[in-house]
Image (cartoon, grey):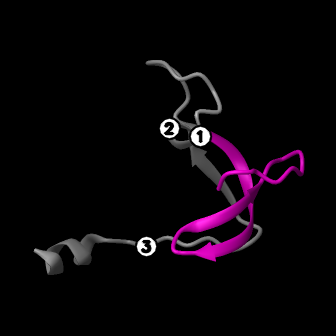
Amino acid sequence: MEKYYNAKFRSTSFKPGDLVYRNNDASHAEQRGKLGPKWEGPYEVTEALGKGAYKLRGCDGKQLPQT
């Protein structure tokens, strides 16, 4: 099973300067209902911390407190 799963798995990594969207489920930045937005952003990646963790900066230049 592991071989089958790993055959279809694609890892993604971002470099500083890339623009990304953030899942609204994790941050709850906007009210979410049935028809609410699922993603928020775009944000710029400022630093890659490793294992899928990144420091993000908004369009206004402010660093996001929770990454």
Q: Is residue 40 left or right of residue 56?
A: left
Q: CA distance from mark 3 to mark 2?
A: 21 Å
Which residue sits at x=89%, y=51%?
61
Q: Amino acid at mark 2?
A: Asp
In which quadrant of the rendered view does residue 54 lie?
A: bottom right
Q: CA distance from mark 2 to mark 1?
A: 6 Å
Residue 53 appears at what percent x and percent y? 58, 66
Secondary structure under tag 2 reads helix
Residue under numbered circle 1: 27
Which residue sits at x=53%, y=68%?
52
Please provide the residue range marked out in magenta.
40-67
Contact, mark 2 vs mark 1 (Cβ under 8 Å):
yes
Which residue sits at x=65%, y=56%?
67
Discs 3/2, front:
2
Mark 3 or mark 2: whose residue is earlier in sequence: 3
Residue 37 appears at what percent x and percent y? 55, 29
Looking at this rendering, what residue extends furthest in the front direction?
65
Which circle marks residue 50 in the picture?
A: none
Residue under numbered circle 3: 11
Which residue sits at x=89%, y=45%?
60
Residue 32 appears at what percent x and percent y? 53, 23
Q: Amino acid at mark 3?
A: Ser
Residue under numbered circle 2: 25
Mark 3 or mark 1: whose residue is earlier in sequence: 3
Q: Residues within 10 Å of mark 2 (few under 14, many from 20)?
A: few
Instruction: Please tell me whether residue 60 belongs to the stretch shown in magenta.
Output: yes
Secondary structure under tag 1 reads helix
